[in-house]
Amino acid sequence: MEEGTKTKKTVFVGGISDDTDETALYESFSTFGDILEVQIPPPANQHQNPAPDAPKHRGFAFVTYTSTADAQDAIDNMDMNELKGRVLKVNLARPMKTAAANLNGNRAIWESEEWLKEHIKPLAQSGGVQGRHAQPIPEESEEKAKSDDGDAMEE
């Protein structure tokens, strides 16, 4: 099955209570069509020593249907409805961001080689520290700076 096709058949169910499990979700969402899979992601720190009162999951789940129409029916009927005392947010699941997508998507523009080649100048030409020391200050500017300092003192 293609990744894009699977995404359109998978719904995101947000806001589930701590005592909600796969069975409860299956029972609630199976009325809209045949379900392939129900997933409740575990908490991010599950591999560390969890406290006895720690949540069993992250508060959301994914339900994958056999058809796109069934997934849309579940969204239309379950979004903003209540399950075990919690109001659910149900919509189409979006594909998970991969490391390859993040390489270009979250980088600053000046980190790309093309931008650097187009915009970067050698330090001497850019007016950087070496460029400033290489150019003498015109005498007119020095005199004006001295006179400006004197005016400030008089006030």
Image (cartoon, rainbow, N blue to C red):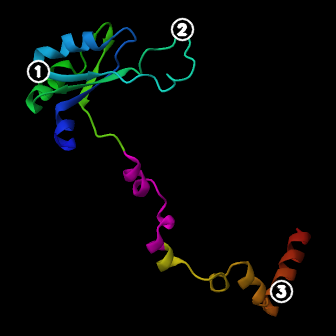
Q: Which residues are magenta?
A: 98-115
**Quadrant of the image occupied by residue 32:** top left
Mark 1 or 3 closer to N-term? 1
Badge 2 amino acid? Pro
Residue sitting at 76 percent across and 89 percent down? 134
Give residue 131's position: percent from left, percent from top: 71, 84
Q: State if disc 2 and disc 3 touch (CB < 8 Å).
A: no
Q: Spatial distance from mark 3 to mark 2, Cα to Cα? A: 73 Å
Disc 2 target residue: 52
Disc 1 target residue: 34
Residue 113's disc is none
Query: Quick one: label 2, few (<14), some, or many (20+) residues within 10 Å?
Result: few
Residue sitting at 22 percent across and 42 percent down? 3
Q: In what quadrant of the picture does the N terminus appear? A: top left
Mark 3 or 2 closer to N-term? 2
Which of the two marks, 1 or 3, is nearer to us in this view? 1
Choose between 153 and 124: the one closer to the eye.
Answer: 124
Give residue 122's position: percent from left, percent from top: 61, 83
| Element type at mark 1 | loop
Badge 1 amino acid? Asp
Which of the two marks, 3 or 2, is nearer to us in this view? 2
Mark 1 or 2 closer to N-term? 1
| Element type at mark 3 | helix
Disc 3 target residue: 142
Badge 3 amino acid? Glu
Q: Spatial distance from mark 1 to mark 3, Cα to Cα? A: 83 Å
